[in-house]
Each structure stands twice: as C-alpha cells, then as structure tokens.
Amino acid sequence: MKSRRTFASIVGMIAVALAATGCGGGGGGGGEAGGGGAADEFPQKRLEYILPFDAGGESDITARLQQEKLAEVLGQTVNISYKPGGGGALGWSELTRMAPDGYKFMGSNLPHIILQPMLRDDAGYETEDLKQVYIFQSTPNALLVPADSDIQTLDDFIEAAKANPGAMSVGGSGDFSANHIGTLMLNDMAGIDVTYTPFSGTGTAVPALLGGHVDALMSYSPQISQLGDQVRAIAVATEERMPGLPDVPTFVEQGHDLVDGAYRGVSVPTDTPDDIVQKLADAFEEVNQDPELVTAFEEQAFVLENYGPEEAIELTEERKAVYEDLLTRLELVP
Amino acid sequence: MGNIIGGAVVLVVCLIFWVQRSYSSEYGGIFPDAVLVALSILGVMLVARGVLWRDRETGWHDTGRLGYKDLGRALILLVAWVASLPILGYLYGGILFFTLVAVMMRTSRPTWKNVLLDFGVAVVVVVLFYLAFTQVLFVSLPELSL
Amino acid sequence: MFEVLGQGLLANLAPSMLLLVLIGTLSGMALGAMPGLSATMGVALLVPFTFAMDPTSGLVLLGAFYMGAIYGGSFTAILVNAPGTPSSIATALDGYPLTRQGRSEFAIVGATMGSFVGGIIGVIALIFLAPPLASFSLRFGPQEYFWVAVFGLTIIASLASGSLLKGLIGGLLGLLLATVGIAPVGGDVRFTFGEPMLQGGVPLVPALIGLFTIPEVIRLIALRTRDAHMVDETRQKDRLGGMLKEILSRPVNLIRSGIIGTFVGILPGAGGSVANLVAYNEAKRASKHPETYGKGEIDGVVASESANNGTVGGGFIPTLTLGVPGTPPDAIILGVLLLHGLRPGAELFTTSGPLVYTFIIALAVSAVMMVPVGLVAGRGLQRGVMALPVRYLAPGITVLTIIGAYAIRSSVVDVFIMLALGVAAYLLQRVGIGGASIVLGLVLGTIAETGLVQGLLTSSGAEMPWTTFFTRPISLVLIAMCLVSILWPFIQKRRTKTTTAGGQAAVPASQRPDTGEGD
C-alpha cells in the first residue's frame, strides 16, 4: 500500500517536471489548441482538488475519502488544498480565474453557488461561471429539537410558532445556506414567523440547541444519527423517509411540501473543454460506486447522488427558480 | 507630535471605513458602527492629548533609533521581494532577494567570495523549504511566470 | 472504568504503539513549527494514511500528531516572533523577548514543561470529568461567548503598559479589521473596497505573521547587526537542571494555566484562541512582579503553553461526549471516528471503551514524550537558529513568513496583506500603538460580534433583547471577571505606588522605554 503511494508520487513528480519543461518550450498557450488529443491523454500531471472551506468540514471528510480512489481511476496523484472564506465565495470567485484545463477542480455546493450571486451585490462570480462536473452527495435538511422539548411533531412546532410570532428561534449553519433557505421555506409554507439564527457551522449550532439557546435547529440529516438520543428529529426534507432513518417522518407526510437540502459536487472554470469535464465526471461516477465509499457515506447518513454535468445544470436551474420565487416574495433579492 | 500623528492616522482610517459603510441585514451594522464610533472618539482624544500635553510627552515610542536610510532600504527590499512573487515565483525570487538581503546586511564592502557564499546559503535554504513544502507536504508555492 | 483504563494503558505500552505515538508527536512538532501550517491542515493531511490502519492505531497517530503540533507552534513564536496560530500568541509575548536576551533555550524548556503539564491536565479532565464538563459547556450561549471574547479583550488593559489609550486604540483597530468581509451573522458584504478577495476578511494567520514578525524583520534588516549573531553570545549558558528547577518551582502557574486551558478548551469555536490569552493574563495578575511580563518573563511562556496544550484534552470532551467538535482538528478526528462507525456520546466510553481509552492515554503518552523530544530536538533547533548570523536569519525568517502567509489559502494576495499589515504595525509601533493589541482585537472581534448578534436574534422573543446580556447567571459571572481584569492593573499600580512611594510613577508612563507590546 505504502510503496504504491510513494511510487505514484514519484511518477507524479516526474510528470510535473516533464510538464514544466514542456510548457517552457511551448510558450504555455497550448491548452485549447490541443483540444481532442488533450482529453485522451488527460490527466498528465498531479491534479488539485480545492475546497473553498476550512479543513475538517463535511466537504473535507468526503474529499479525503475520494482522494485515493480518484487517484487510482485517473492514474495521477490528487492533492487536496483549501481556499476558505466568505462561505465559499472566495474560492469560487478564484476558480473563475483559474486555467480551464481540468487540472484544478473545486468543491461546489448547492444552494451556495445559486444564492450568493443572487443575494450579494458582488459575490465575485456568477452561478454560470462555474461548470459543474458532478454532484456526488447530498444532505437533506432536518428539523431537530432537544430531546426534552415539548414539541413532538411538526404540528406542535407550527402551533408553538403561531402562538408567539417572531419569538421562536431556529438555529442553522450559515447565511443563505440550505438550512437558512429551508427555514424561510417552512415559514412561507406553514404561514409562521420563526427567527433564523445562523451559526458558523454545524459544529457551533449543535451546542446552541443542546444547551437550549435556540428552540430548534434546521440542520442536515447526518446530525440525526450523530447526535443520537440527545435530539428529536421532527421532520426531514426528503420525498420519502430515508432508508437509514425509518422512524423520522418527512415534511411531506406531515402536510408541507418541503424537499430541499445541500448538494455537494465539484466544478471547473466554465471554459474547460467538454471532453475533459466528461473525463472527470466519469472518474467521480466510478468513485461513487466504490463499495467502501458507499458504506462510509451510508454510515454518516449522506445521500449518494449521481448528477453528471448536464443533470447538474438541470438541478441548478430548477432550484434557482424555486429560490428566486421565494426570495423575491420575501423581498430579499436586492 | 507622535500623539497627533497617531490620532490623525486613526481618524483617517475611521473615515475610510465610514464611507464604505453599507449593510444589508438588520444587525449587520451594530458592531462595526459601534467600533467606528468608539475608535473615532479615542482618535480625537489622542490628538487632544498630543496638543495639550505637547510638553509632557513626545508621543514617540522609543524602539531603538533606526536611520531613515537603513529603514528605507529594509522596506524597499521587503516590498520588492513580495511584489516580485507573482512574477519570479517563490523559488527564483527567494534566492535572488535572500542573496540581496544577506549581501546588503554586510557592513564591510562585500567581496565576490562573500557574495558567492551568501548566494550558496540562499540556494540551500530556499530550495530546502521549496522541496519540503511542494514534495513532502504537497503545498504548492508561487511559480515563475514570465 | 478503571479496568478499561488499565487496558488502555497496557495497550499504549506495546512497543509498536509507543513508536506510533513517537512518530505522531515528532511529525506533529515539525509541522506545528512551520508558520502557516496549522494543526488542522496537518491532521487533515494525515487522515488518508490512517485509512490503511486499524481504527485504534489511526486515532492514536492523529491524536499524538495533534498534541505535538500544538506544542511545535511554540518554537516559531519563541525563536522568530511568529505565532503560527492564535493559540501561541501569548507565547510570543514573552518568548521572543527571552530570545532577544539570549535566553531562548530557557523559553523552549519552559514551553516544553508547560505543554507537558497542560497536556496531562487536559487528559485527566477528559478521563474523569468529561460528562459534567460537557454539560457545563452547553450553558454557554451566544451571550456568554460575547462576554468570553470581551474578557479576552480586557487583557489589553494589562498589555498596554505604556498608555491605556493607545492600547485601546490598537484593540479597536483590530476589531475594525475583523469586520472586513462577510458578516458572520447576516451575511452582509462589508468593507471589501470592491475587492472580492476581501470577502473572506483579513486572513488571520497572515495577519498574525505580519503584525508580529514583519516589524522584527524590518528591524533586523535595518539594523544590519553587522556580522554579529542575534543575541549576546558571551552570556553564560543556563544549565538544564537550573532551568527545570526554576520552572518547576512555581507549580501553581503550571497547573492553574493547564486548568484554564482545559476549561476554556471545552467551548467550541472559542477555546484555542482564547485559552492562552486568559492563562497569560491570570499568570500576570497572580504574579508578584507583573511588570516583568512582556519583557521576557518565563512564567508567561509557561502559562500560555500549558493552557494551549490543555485545550487538546478539553476540546475532546464535547467531541467525544456530545459529538460536538471543540476545535477544528477535533472535527477531523470526529469525522474519522464516524467513518469507523463509532458514534460519540456517553455510551461511546462503554461500548468502545478499549479504543477510546487507548486513544486518550495515547494523548497523555504523547504529552510525556514531548519532554525528552522537546528537550533534545527543541533545544537543538534553538541552537541551530541562534548559531545563524543575523545576515542569514533575517532573510531566512522572511522566506518563512512568505510561505506561512501563502500556504493557508495558496494566495499571493495574502502575502501582500501580511506585508502591508507588517509595515503598518511597524509604523504604528513608532507612535506607541503595539501590534499585540491589534492582534487581540482581530482574533476576538469575530467571536464577540457573532455572540452579540446571535444573542440579539435568539432572544428576539424577549421584550428588550439587549437585557439578556445582563441577566443570565454565567454572563453575570463573566461580566464580574471582565471588571476585575480591567481594574486590576490600576489596583496593582496603586499598591506599588504606596509601597515605593512615588519615585517611578512620577515619570510619564509613555516616556519609559516600553517593551510591553512585544517589540
């Protein structure tokens, strides 16, 4: 195992050296011209998997799981690096300026890449500037209350919220995240007014719930099993009950058509040639079928997704329409 | 004089931030506005102190006198080094400016032998860090781009 | 429990396990000593390697690495005034002045012993007090986080030995810098001056390096300290026995700081940055000679390092009992636990007892190993650095600062920000506004603002949301602590005034040569 890694990195180093000399001679302008031939031989050197978030988050754990398998499929080492800031916006605006050669790809999340350009005056990028390669995973929203709360069902929750408009606080991870928009959607659908309080991540939101500083938490499904009997999940935002969580009812079956969550994938700059994008997408598809990875995803209650480049665009368009409608009605779009 | 200059700088910083104010959420402005107001008040206090106490204290902080020429040279070297990063990259820029700094820090007129020695040390140090970061830790560093 | 504890201990005494801990500790130290490479990044780099191991070995390696990395951060703070993470800010405040006096070896030994004791105290708390401490940490809501940050900021009052006004200005400048970028709550884009890069705010590590290290580099290059070495070589060498004796002769400081580190470490999100500062401040307050702090006081180094290694054990308390990571590296280790199908919670200690206790004991073994490793490798590194002529040291430090600022986000802009802040800090130092207070504001500003706005939001049901900041019991305790911390320097001054009867106090404070701000 270890020797193979060393070997791979030696091969990688040689490839880098070769690529560097090649570039020096050719003057560097050959990216697009190489076209078809380039895709056949792609990749020739070490690839860079960039995360627009801090180390240690869910995206990071997922990427670390994929890292070695991607390297096996693509035949080159894959290096993970970080470009955190602005809830991911910093990395994505940087991505639009990177070389469109497929060697650098970046984790990209829905709804972040839809909502940031929509709601910020200058997010530094537009949704269309990112070419989504693959969406491999999702985490549906889930509404949690502390285990000792009086609230047993979604109806109890709505009743409590109606009794005291604006007073109930619902925590979640970040602004304009799936948690945030999920809370807004619930407000909208149920005709209630709960106050959303963003935390810097799931890690700081959860203690606020457990300590009773917020009344409920709009979080992601993995938290349900992770937190065990400390919390009660009163609804999860999927069409049907999740296989790993048969006891948790959906919003839909409790009368509210709320199906939403965060989707994780990778993107490249928009000018990247289609055949190279396809090659990367194929690699991610293959990795997504690795039994070891499938089990690991299941254990953490991640939902495995398989959206190729085209399907990812469709999904993005569809979600964008939903969000735009809601946010325009709430007068949040500038 | 030091107090007046210090206070004035603080007030200018406050002004620069103040004209940039634009908040989109209900509570987005509370904290920065509070900080800006407090900082401006303290800035005014510092200027006032500089004027009223001009005989009692200079307001300068004694950090071991540096000649302006030496200071200027140090600043120019550092700024040029950092500014060259996007062009020369870490490796070549590092070797060049490491050597320059080392040579210029010599007090006696450097001989060719001295320069060569400094250059050698520069190559060893810079390349060692370069290899450690790019090959062992897989952290990429800025590369030469001309 | 004691049975599994014993098993855990035995498992750790196996030669292969000891070797693993040693490798983890050593590589952690090496990585921690590089500015710009955080413990978090290092642990993340290591994760894929642990997939090939059995769960216990993998976790032991990660834990030992983490412990070593936190300790390794003290080296650059002491030797070149470059705190690589917020958790070693206070180490630099006294460690670097010691280096300039030629006593860096003493500082390294102090950091080593502090880290050792702090690490052990954290582990003891993790073993025996995890459930009660975890439920205590849950009582800290947004309002309490706000006050914790304010408490951290009160240290400015004792840092600013020159002029309180200038100290406050420095702190507020730091708070202002902290507001650049996306608002932590509400998502407003603030003070970016039209530059999308600034959405991420002023990056912390480049700012730390810029504000602390660059003024020193400027000074070294400008001084052209001839062909001399940085420090007085003729000074008689301290002896190891003597140094150890002096450090261990004040066990109260060691233990108190370790306890502070453990307690503050259980607060998710705030622990690492705040613990070392609080411990430093408390050490200074308790000291019989507070005026030596900031000028090379070994107790300051010991306090800071004892506290930040205490946060390792403390941070694992909410991680293992609640599934809430106390620090960013904990988040990664939690992820690894989950990947192996281990669910955190009180039952983790019973269902997977052997694994958990082996892991916890390994943290303690790693803390013990830091002593010989630190005393040999750490002092070796220190001798090597000190043997360099300044001619090579100054550009060498510059190389490190550039890598350190760049590596966090692979961004040249961060290097520019580092240098700009560094030059600004040098100039502000000339008018008496020190970099240390700016750093405090920058580090604590986001925590304070987040707590403030979240507190207002979560209590929006109350008639006057503001009042919740003053009515909650823990908030009241924290407010009292803030007041004591602010007023203490004045009380102390009054005390010394009455004892030394005027004399010194007649000289306006700002005319005294003041090294209290880490210059």
Image: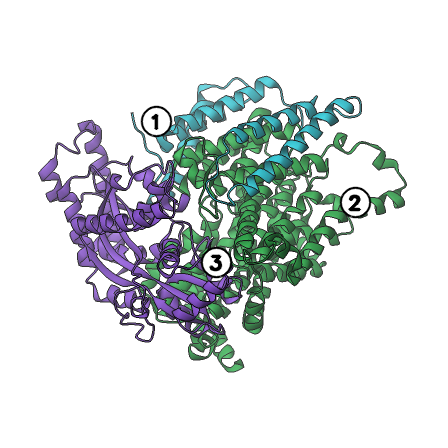
Name chain C's colour.
Answer: green
The answer to which quarter of the image holds residue A259 is: bottom left
Q: Residue at x 37, y 56 (%)?
A: A188
- Numbered disc 1: secondary structure: helix
Q: Label 3 is found on which chain of the structure? A: A
Tell me, yes or no, whether dots 2 and 3 are on the same chain.
Answer: no
- Tell whether C239 sits left or right of C123: right
Chain A drawn in what color? Answer: purple
Residue tagged by mark 1?
B87
How packed is label 1: few (under 14 Cα within 10 Å), some, or many (20 or more)? some
| Residue extending furthest toward the bottom | C3
Q: Residue C318, labelled with which disc? A: none
Asked whether residue C134 appears in the rendered view, the answer is yes
In depth, the one of A241 and C173 nearer the eye is: A241
Q: Position of residue C482 (x, y in %)?
A: 69, 52
Q: How many marks?
A: 3
Expressed as whole percent of the image width and height from the top left, the position of residue A55 reads: 40, 52
Q: Are marks 2 and 3 in contact (CB under 8 Å)?
A: no
For mark 1, name the chain: B
The location of residue B80, given as percent across then percent down, is 44, 23
Are dots 3 and 1 on a single chain? no
* Relative image position of residue C394 (x, y in whole percent): 52, 32
Element assignment for label 2: helix
Residue at image x 37%, y 46%? A88
